[in-house]
Amino acid sequence: MPNTDKFHISLTDLSSNFHEVEPALTNREAVEEANRCLYCYDAPCITACPTGIDIPKFIKKIASGNMKGSATTIMDSNPVGASCARVCPTDELCEGACVLNHSTKPIMIGNLQRHATDWAIQNDQILFQKGESNGKTVAVIGGGPAGLSAARELARLGYDVTIYEASEKAGGLNTYGIVSFRLPQKISYWEIDQVKSLDVKIKTNTAVGKDISAEEILSNYDRVVMAVGMSSVPNLGIEGEELEGVYDAIEFVKDTKTKPLTDQFVGKKVVVIGAGNTAIDGATCSVRLGAENVKILYRRTQEEMTAYDFEYEFAKQDGVEFRWLTQPVKIHGDAGGNVRAIECLRMELGQPGADGRRRPKPIEGSNFMIPVDAVIKAIGQTRHLSLIEQFELEHADGVVQVSETYRTSNPKVFACGDLVFGKGKGEAMVVTAAQQGKNAAYAIHEQFTQESLTV
């Protein structure tokens, strides 16, 4: 049975396992932490932030009690700053660059950012205003972090913006793909409302390429921003994938955020295939759903995994086991078609491939079995090839090729976020997608500005 001292197994109590893990700072704690900041003139933490938040400025405003000013400073630079306060790898970015690392401990920048944005959320603050209309229209395809950021900046610059979102709600990864105990949906919804307040239209349940054609989009708008992110988890390509109890990690996490929790994992053995942040989410969700034992299987070693270090440590604290150099080759089921075991091979690392990572190769005759009741696939995601080709954009296996200004092979179309994130480079960060969305918006504005000067 599961460790009931840590995680309850009744349906009533399962939901409590999905409450935010990291406690918020109290007002006193936030002010005391803010007063530790040296307010560096040439602050390395700003340089380390992909969106360039003026970190000393927002922290000083917390110290002086100007909470709205603090939240505005954050959100001005990062349109999804409330989400990033919770999911950014701050130890690798802003906090990792803090000068106090050399003497005591870094300022808790992420916690302070959350404190300021939480105040804005709790006090229903609308922080920005739409710019004066310039008569130009832009369609943003995809309402995730990159799309929302592009839309917000364009609206502030005076553009008439419409977001096309295939899901029921906008927010993309922040709404559906990051576990609730890291990022509750209400945080993403507030960021969406900030964008809506600028008269940005969001058409949900509308898949471009299906519900509306690429040709229609190109004909009806002056410019287009492609920010559709990634698609579904691909098949493993092994026997037994069709069995009951095999899950797509993206859909699995989404279900925990959008559907009533069930007891189907209570007392079960679960394996997650993959070692990225989504794999960690699948594993820690399984623990919180009452699984007795959860293992992550990865065909390379810890050094090659793409999950953030803090996510890895978090999973270990939850009791998740990691099996390195392990390659699943077959999923075995019972007579009823339910998963009962997974067959694996032991691996060893060979020479580096084109992406610089050492290629795993099987050790012949090393097959072994792991008893299991559920398998969660988290081996990356496929790309929206059909949509990319409908817009006739140049791409490399689904990675849209863009210039330094995020312009695609069609000068009317810009692309940002996961769509332009190259393969073999780990996982794109939410904060990086936000900055790319901003940059795409500025590039569109610059393009129109140059055109008006030449008329």
Image (spheres, rainbow, N blue to C red):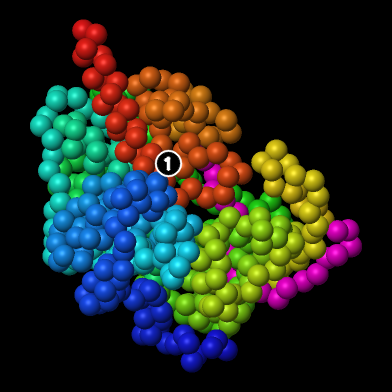
Viewer-nearest residue: 17 or 203: 17
Would residue 259 appear left or right of 247 to someone viewing this image?
left
Q: Helix, strand or loop at disc 1?
A: helix
Task: List x then y, in percent, for residue 358.
Answer: 74, 49
Task: List x then y, in percent, for residue 245.
Answer: 58, 68
Would residue 88 appear left or right of 236 to someone viewing this image?
left
Q: Is residue 6 something one can see in this rendering?
A: yes
Quarter of the figure with the N terminus: bottom right
Residue positioned 18% across, 37% down in the render: 156
418 shown above or below 44: above
Location of mark 1 (residue): 417
The magenta segment: 363-386
Residue positioned 86% across, 59% down in the render: 363
Task: List x then y, in percent, for residue 325.
Answer: 74, 62
Return the residue found at the far bottom. 5
Whether residue 45 appears in magenta in the rendering, the answer is no
Q: Is residue 168 something one can see in this rendering?
A: no
Task: List x then y, in percent, for residue 107.
Answer: 37, 66
The residue type indicated by label 1 comes to Gly
